[in-house]
Amino acid sequence: MKREQKHETDYIQKYQDEGYTKNYLFENGCLIDSETKYAYQPDEIYIVAHHRYEGMSDPDDMSILYVIETKDQQRGTHLLGYGPTADLEEAEFFKDIPKKNYSKNSDINELT
């Protein structure tokens, strides 16, 4: 039986250990590389994996961790809040990523 990760930080660390070290921020309708400040559009983003988290005691404490590769081979993560207080523009950005850019792989243990 696989041990399930309990918190976003557990997965973030695992993915960082696998080379997904970039941090992405959502700003002005784009996903921004926090170092280079390059603004990615939805068709430039590939979702390697995503993990949902639901708060145990607070319904506003819900999030999705996206594991991302970009058209220019950058790799990192982005944490998106969802639920009643979610940023709808940010959620729409991720809906606009083409379905063909989503991997069916969602398990860190299956990454090569």
Image: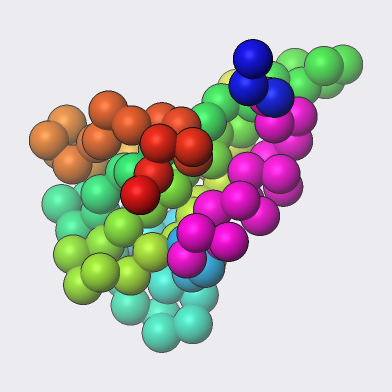
Residue at image coords 58%, 61%: 17
Q: Is residue 7 magenta?
A: yes
Any part of residue 112 in sight:
yes
Any part of residue 85 in sight:
no
Residue extending furthest right? 57
Left of 26 or right of it: where is 86? right
Q: Is residue 35 above or below residue 102?
A: below
Residue at image coords 41%, 31%: 106
Magenta stretch, residue numbers:
4-19
Q: Is residue 90 above or below residue 82?
A: below
Q: Quadrant of the N terminus?
A: top right
Left of 56 or right of it: where is 41? left
Q: Is residue 11 magenta?
A: yes
| Quadrant in the rendering for residue 101 | top left
Image location (x, y in percent) of residue 69: 31, 58
Image location (x, y in percent) of residue 63: 61, 32
Residue at image coords 40%, 36%: 110
